[in-house]
Amino acid sequence: MQPISIDLLLHCSWVLPIVPNNQILQDYSVAIDGGRILEILPTESAKQKYHSEQTEELNRHILMPGLINTQCNSSLRLLRGINQDLQHKHWLESDPSLPETVFSDSKFIHDSVNIAIAEMIRTGTTCFADTHSAGELFIDIARKTGIRSQAGFTLQERSSIFGNNADDYLHRGLKLRDNHSHHPLIKIACSLSQICDIEDATLERLAAYANELDLPIQIQCNETLEAIETCLKKTGHRPLQHLNEKGLLLPETQLVGINYLNSEDSSILEKTNNHVVICPELHSTLSSETRPLDSLVQAGVNLSLSTVKAVDNKDFNLMAVIKAAATAIKGSCGKDSEQAAHQALRMATINGAKALGWENQIGSIEEGKHADLIAVEIDSIHHQPLYNPASQLVYSSTNSPVTHSWVAGQSLLKADNLCTLDERKLIQSAKDWAKQLVN
């Protein structure tokens, strides 16, 4: 039989498909055509069945779905570590959303976002949700780099570089959505923080738009006891109850920063079926007033992972977050290392895809899905003997370099080289900004 001609064929030592759960395939290949996964089959069969324009021999690697970072702020990437060194700088004490600061400089935003994306690609992220993104500027950068992303537009009452008032924020955000609703790699969402400072009428109007347009909403919620107490004083309700009464706990809603829950909160989450975004690196025990992490898992809440702000001296390496999540799952849920590793990997892949409404396109290696994939080298001295590739990948993450990355079959990283970004220029721009910000 004549071999079938396809775009890309990946021959792998190991394939971690994510779906079905807890499965590892050895000496398997993935056939890709038109940006989608055509078939997953044994390598010997693949070599006979397919002829490809490009073939990658990944004989020291594990192939898995690209990682999904469900909340970060890429426009602040250039401020990593700056708090400790320049904490008395007057502009650092200002609100990043206010006009006439370095944060409103389009060149600063451009360089910061590009550096953040480069770092994410290098550490395995192929899709991310950006909070308070810089609108068209952010989308233009994301499109040029080829990464998949959710761009969050700000909604608040007071004026900032993003808008004049609530009506203006909504108008700009919905226009952004209309302009890019058909782009396959871009989603538009609304980003909310300090919800008790937003007028009831604004929240109700947002809920109407979200229902009508299936608009995703990412909401900072229950992050601190102080925030919960403030919401109680201003609205008479805890944040989750307040959001529920205003019709904002929709299937598309992504709740970020939840660290405290009581029985009422937990009951609401079980009924509303929302997505919860966590960062176990920031809050290693995921504190709760009444129930730990295992209760959220057993209640069927979809948990996905995120990195924290770069200005907090953290990076965009989701591999490190996966390791922290696995450690938290072992401690809270009583699962063994292998079970915890697989669950943490699902949080960073298929769960993240569900949170962003992309579970039918990405998040697992299945026939028909987009080829958003990464190859991770897993054959060094640190991984030997290699009894369980998934566990080794998670718990030895710092010794597992990502060497290849694809989004919809297009290379973002090949043989450890960025394909859509100039790394040398990015490094120089970071150095130039460091000098400018210090002086």
Image (cartoon, rainbow, N blue to C red):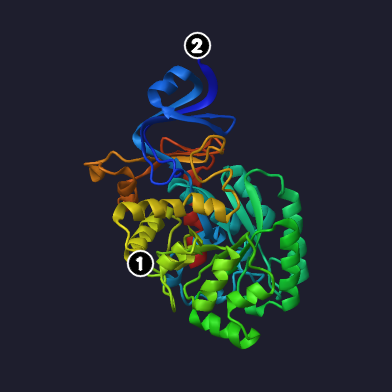
408 or 200, which lies in front?
Answer: 200
The amino acid on which the numbered mark 1 sits, given as a three-letter code, is: Ser
The amino acid on which the numbered mark 2 sits, given as a three-letter code, is: Met
Check disc 1 and report the residue beneath it: 332
Q: Check if mark 2's residue and mark 1's residue have beta carbons within 8 Å.
A: no
**Farthest residue, direction bottom:** 233
What secondary structure is marked by label 1? helix
Query: Along the polypeptide, which appears first: circle 2 or circle 1?
Result: 2
Q: Residues within 10 Å of mark 1 (few under 14, many from 20)?
A: some
135 or 330, which lies in front?
Answer: 330
Disc 2 versus disc 1: distance between alpha carbons?
54 Å
338 or 146, which lies in front?
Answer: 338
What secondary structure is marked by label 2? loop
Where is residue 138 drawn, in percent x and y? 63, 53
Where is residue 183 drawn, in percent x and y? 68, 44
299 over 400 or under it: above or below: below
262 over 359 or under it: above or below: below
Where is residue 35 drawn, in percent x and y? 57, 33
Q: Residues within 10 Å of mark 2 (few under 14, many from 20)?
A: few
The residue located at (54%, 56%) in the rendering is 112
Check disc 2 and report the residue beneath it: 1
The residue located at (30%, 47%) in the rendering is 392
126 over 36 or under it: above or below: below
Residue 99 seen anywhere in this rendered image of the structure: yes
Q: Is residue 40 left or right of residue 245?
A: left
Residue 114 seen anywhere in this rendered image of the structure: no
Where is residue 87 drawn, in percent x and y? 46, 75
The residue located at (72%, 78%) in the rendering is 199
